[in-house]
């Protein structure tokens, strides 16, 4: 029995589609999961700060030009965000990269940079 070229092409595409779906599912972590992954034992505190800052909204933008989950200010932190994370500025809206940069700030200054530091 021979298979048509179309059927063979479809059969080859299935694994690629499956891998793409798996990658998307893996990327669908909640902001809380991303914070836990980055902050480890300090995740509870970090979640309270992020909730107070952005209500856990990775796409949040404030009138004072603060962006993402931890409300990173573009005027002060844009260049540093890109250097620390190795990501372009628009990734500040990704919960993982926003958390990575927030952890960097936390490691340097504790919760002092955040208006919602009292939430911990």
Image (cartoon, grey):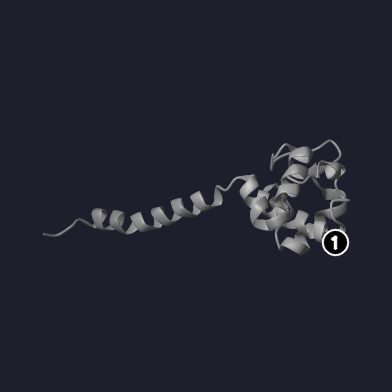
Q: Quadrant of residue 117?
A: top right
Q: Is residue 55 left or right of residue 107?
A: left
Q: Looking at the image, which residue is at 85% across and 46% down?
A: 114
Q: Looking at the image, which residue is at 40% across and 57% down?
A: 16
Q: Looking at the image, which residue is at 78% across and 38% down?
A: 52
Is 111 or 13 nearer to us in this picture? 111
Q: Is residue 117 above or below residue 97?
A: above
Q: Quadrant of residue 110?
A: bottom right
Q: Dot 1: what SS?
A: helix
Q: How many marks?
A: 1
Q: Which residue is mark 1?
A: 108
Is 109 or 89 nearer to us in this picture? 109
Task: Give percent across and percent down for residue 61.
Answer: 77, 39
Q: Can residue 76 be seen by looking at this rendering?
A: yes
Q: Is residue 53 left or right of residue 97?
A: right
Is 45 or 8 nearer to us in this picture? 45
Is 27 or 82 nearer to us in this picture? 27
Task: Give percent across and percent down for residue 88.
Answer: 71, 57
Task: Give percent across and percent down for residue 32.
Answer: 64, 46
């Amino acid at each position: 029995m021979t298979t048509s070229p179309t059927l063979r092409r479809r059969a080859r595409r299935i694994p690629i589609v499956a891998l793409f779906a798996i990658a998307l599912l893996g990327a669908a972590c909640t902001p809380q999961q991303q914070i836990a992954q980055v902050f480890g034992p300090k995740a509870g505190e970090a979640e309270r700060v992020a909730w107070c800052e952005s209500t856990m909204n990775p796409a949040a933008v404030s009138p004072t030009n603060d962006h993402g989950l931890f409300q990173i200010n573009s005027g002060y932190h844009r260049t540093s965000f890109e250097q620390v994370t190795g990501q372009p500025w628009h990734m500040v809206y990704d919960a993982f990269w926003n958390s990575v940069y927030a952890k960097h700030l936390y490691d340097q200054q504790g919760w002092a940079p955040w208006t919602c530091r009292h939430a911990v």
